[in-house]
Amino acid sequence: MQLLRNFATVGAFTAASRVLGFARDILVAALLGAGPVADAFFVAFKLPNLFRRLFAEGAFNSAFVPLFARVRAEEGEDGAEKFASSVLSWLLICLLVLTTLAELFTPYFILVMAPGFSADSKVELTTLFTRICFPYLAAMSLVAFLSGILNTLDRFAAAAFAPVLLNIVMISALLVAAFMELDAESAGFALSWGVFAAGIAQVVLLAVAVKRLGVRLTLPRPRPSKRLKRLLVLGLPGVAAGGITQINIVVGTIIASFWPAAVSHLYYADRLYQLPLGIVGIALGVALLPDLSRRLRNGDVGGALWTQNRAFEFALMLTLPAAAALIVVPLEIVVTLFERGAFDREAAALTAAAVSAYGFGLPAFVLIKVFSPAYFAREDTATPMIFAAISMVVNIGGSLILARMLAPQGLPHVGIAAATSLAGWVNASLLFVGLLRRGDFKPDPLLWTRALGIFAASLALMIVAVLIARELNGWFFNADLVSAAAALGLLVTGSAIIFALVCEFSGAIGVRDLVRVFRRR
């Protein structure tokens, strides 16, 4: 199946990126810990990342891909190139203005993102880090634009590989900092410059990939047009609809800034659940949108429904076991990956509590990526925007209430993570019900059969994971890194075997189905 092959391509490179991202975060934890310097860098990095995911990924994935595909079908390659070039000209102007304003008014942006920082000296350090990192936004917006062109043309590898460069460059900066034995603040500066350099490297990579496909992009004089207006109309709602998870995470950062180290604990927890979310959710979302747009444009409604059903069950198969593990054995995972250097056992325990809370919301975050393309492919970004706004209200209210409730126990960040998960389920449920009511999604009998089998396999995994973790308790908590890593490997392997066996015998997706997909790549 073309969808699964595209998913496998994006997922494989995303997995490589996430593995390198873990290596990067292990180094960050060792060099920066979970203190004021780490808080300052995470907020500085989150600010351009937020704009990138909202205005670049959200807007372009939801609006640019369907429009570019339509222009290419109606006017051929020349018309598509003219449209893309016009978009590029306007994009560069907007990025120049936004970056200039951000550099001038950085302290004010920070007070919005982390108002709790105003009570201490972290604002100055965060301002310096942010001014170095923010041009990354411009670079990543161009990357999103170029990725949209490549994905529409069924070329997913280069765009999926681009994030790997980010981690390679940042790891290199951290290794240099460790080799030079820099203090935490100096290491933070080195890391910020690494972000800046990584953005340039990614743009160059995708620009070369687009050129090799024979797509000729120019910089014409920016002029308004009906198609650009349509892109704006679709793109603005797409900012909210496509980036709701990121909006909710930023809301959590704002609230967490009022408690010491809470921002850092949420960041490390976020990195853990972002691994399956990136590999499954983002990969499926990226591969699904062009596929649905193409089928609907050709009038293949039945094929579109079949694709959605298979994407749904594939998401469940890869997401539910990951969520189960994050819920029941978060401390074992956090201790193995992060506990070293400045990151101690207390920090690990506090981070693990947030990981478990995020785990409950992981399936919802992935399903949002599965359901949203069904709206976007029909050029409807307004409905997901409304649902996103509702879930945002739930997230803000829930974060404020739960953070205050758990603050006396020293766990305000866990309340924030739980509210984010709740908001994710609200958003996913609204999207699902909306599709059902419109007749744009109809679960078939095979989906229900496989979903029940996957759910049963996930329950079995939870039981086995807890038993294995209990038996290997000494390896995880009273031994060296090698023993802890070996224990985590055994836990993952044993749990995966049980999950696969139950899936096979219950009628859910079997091993043979997966092998067939990868053989056809």
Image (cartoon, helix red, strand yellow):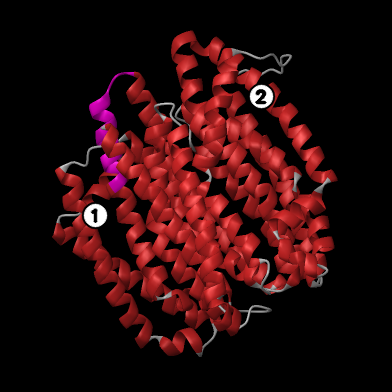
- Residue count near mark 2 (Cα–Cα under 10 Å), binned few <14, some 14–19, many ≥20: many
Give the image location of residue 293, x and y in percent: 39, 26
Label 1's element?
Answer: helix
Is residue 351 depicted above or below 508 in this figure?
A: below
Residue 93 percent coordinates (x, y): 75, 27
Does label 1 or label 2 sit earlier along the sequence?
2
Quarter holding the N terminus is top left
Q: Position of residue 400 (x, y in %)?
A: 56, 65
Query: Residue 515 magenta-drawn?
Result: no
- Closer to the camera, 167 or 326? 326
Q: What secondary structure predominates along the stretch shown in magenta? A: helix
Residue at image x 56%, y 38%? 239
Q: Left of 31 or right of it: where is 443?
A: left
Q: Are marks 1 and 2 in contact (CB under 8 Å)?
A: no
Identify whether 382 is placed above or below 51.
above
Q: Which residue is mark 1?
A: 511
Q: Which residue is mark 2?
A: 88
**Highlighted magenta segment, given as a residue range:** 298-312
Q: Residue drawn at (75%, 55%), measured in percent from left and top?
A: 110
Estimate the x, y position of residue 153 in percent, counting from the top left: 47, 25
Q: Quadrant of residue 188?
A: bottom right
Q: Is residue 309 magenta?
A: yes
Left or right position of 72 against 136:
left
Kindly report the distance in space between the C-alpha atoms of the residues bearing marks 1 and 2: 44 Å
Q: Nearer the viewer, mark 1 or mark 2?
A: 2
Work out whether residue 361 or residue 186 is closer to the camera in this orientation and state it: 361
